[in-house]
Image: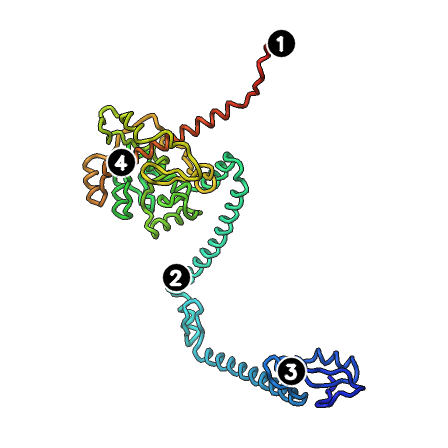
Amino acid sequence: MVEPAQNQLASNSFRHTCVACRVVFADQNAHREHFKSDFHRYNLKRKIADLAPVVYETFRCKVAEMALQKVDSLISAEENESKIHAHQQQQGKKCTICQKFYQSDAAYDNHCKSKKHLESVQKSITIQNSSSSAVVADDQISSTILSEDLNLEDDGSSWEDVESVSGGGEAITPRNCFFCPENCQDLQQNLHHMALKHGFFVVDLDYCVDLEGLLTYLGQKVGQGFVCLWCNEKGRRFKSLDAVQKHMIQKGHCRMYHDGEAMLEYEDFYDYSSSYPDAGDGKMDVDEEEEDINLSSLEVNGYELVLPSGATIGHRSLFVYFRQNLRPTNQICLSKTSKKANPVDQQFFGRYKALGWTSTSPALVKRKERDLAYLRKIRSKHYMRLGVKANKLQKHFKSQIDF
């Protein structure tokens, strides 16, 4: 670059001036080249910082000093690397997995053959595989959610999609634990194990009329659908049985959710008629039932339904977005016609109470039955409206008379 003239006054022949550098140029080309130079940029930065510009000789000296400092830093870095390398050679070989140094090759080879080193290698490989599989699982979950969002127009198609996704596991039998691989001899032993080891108790056990069917249904939810028994499809999704079992154990979700809409999900396995005043007939007083549940309140407005107990349930028009109860195809879980006797004897009830189980109070049972009756009426009214709409498919013609 041509050195600019410093500290010259602009005359009639010099019209090209740089204000930042206080330099004048004879022609326009030199002026333009000056704007592209590092000298001009340096003086611009000094001007922004409210500093006086420097002359070109001073700028060249600063550039030379910076170059020398860079060379010195490179030399010092090379010296440090050589020192580190020499120190490592003095220390011997290093095991990167165990983070240990060895003086000789023989000691290093013996360490590589040791049981502790092999276990560390296997553990690191397992951690890497689990992290990579977690990333793949997240991608699969996001793609599954995206595909479900694109197919929300038809209720039937959305049911088929969810069933195909959730049918990847194997159902847990009533004699196997829901939270660990424990295999028991009978149903009562399994209940005792889950209560003692995991704190799991069957809700309203004294009113359960199909205990084996209930445990079969819960086993299908956990084993086939990978659903947490407490989150009940309202929480995160899981891709394997091991993942949902670890979630329930770590979060303390080893328990049944039996409120709100979940009561309708498990109503096939319970019978609260024994709690009625006329338990011998097995029926509630009709006047009392009609008094507790006002039929005019069945007209649902908005997107929430408040039960007599105060529980709130979302509108069924949003059902496909927030909740899908997958009922298994097993006939044991869906049978309503046969009311089986509770296979649990009184002796087991005593042991169950000793583990911490408490019987449901009559007031709570009555509240649950009122909510169930309320939900049944809502459901029957919806089915009636659906049937009326389905019958309006035939075209109607005006009667051809008076002609």
* Three-letter code for the amino acid on which mark 4 is drawn: Val
381 relative position to 39: left or right: left
SS at mark 4? helix
User: Between tags 2 and 1, which lies in front?
Assistant: 1
Nearer the observer, 150 or 130: 150
Circle nearer the N terminus (3, 4) = 3
Mark 2 to mark 1 CA distance (whole Å): 99 Å
Q: Which of marks 3 and 4 is in front?
A: 3
Dot 2 amino acid type: Glu
Using the numbered discs, state the Cα–Cα distance from disc 1 to disc 3 in whole angstroms: 105 Å
Q: Name the residue under label 2.
A: 119
The circle on residue 309 is: none
Q: Mark 1 points at which residue?
A: 403
Q: Where is residue 149 in the image (x, y as percent from the top left)?
A: 52, 43
* Mark 1 or mark 3: whose residue is earlier in sequence: 3
Q: Which residue is drawn at 34% across and 38% down?
A: 173
Please identify, in this view, whether the residue under mark 1 or under mark 3 is nearer the observer.
Answer: 1
Q: Name the residue under label 4.
A: 365
Pick whichever of labels 3 and 2 is earlier in the sequence.
3
- Residue beneath label 3, please? 43
Q: In this view, does 390 lie above or below 164?
A: above
First in sequence: mark 4 or mark 1?
4
Spatial separation of the CA atoms under disc 4 and disc 1: 66 Å
Q: What whole-number distance in Å separates the C-alpha atoms at marks 4 and 2?
A: 55 Å
The image position of residue 76, as x and y in percent, is 53, 84
Q: Pointer 3: residues within 10 angstroms few (<14), some, or many (20+)? A: many
Which label lies toward us, 3 or 2? Answer: 3
Q: Are marks 4 and 1 in contact (CB under 8 Å)?
A: no
Inspect the image, locate mark 1, and give the three-letter code of the amino acid beneath it.
Answer: Phe
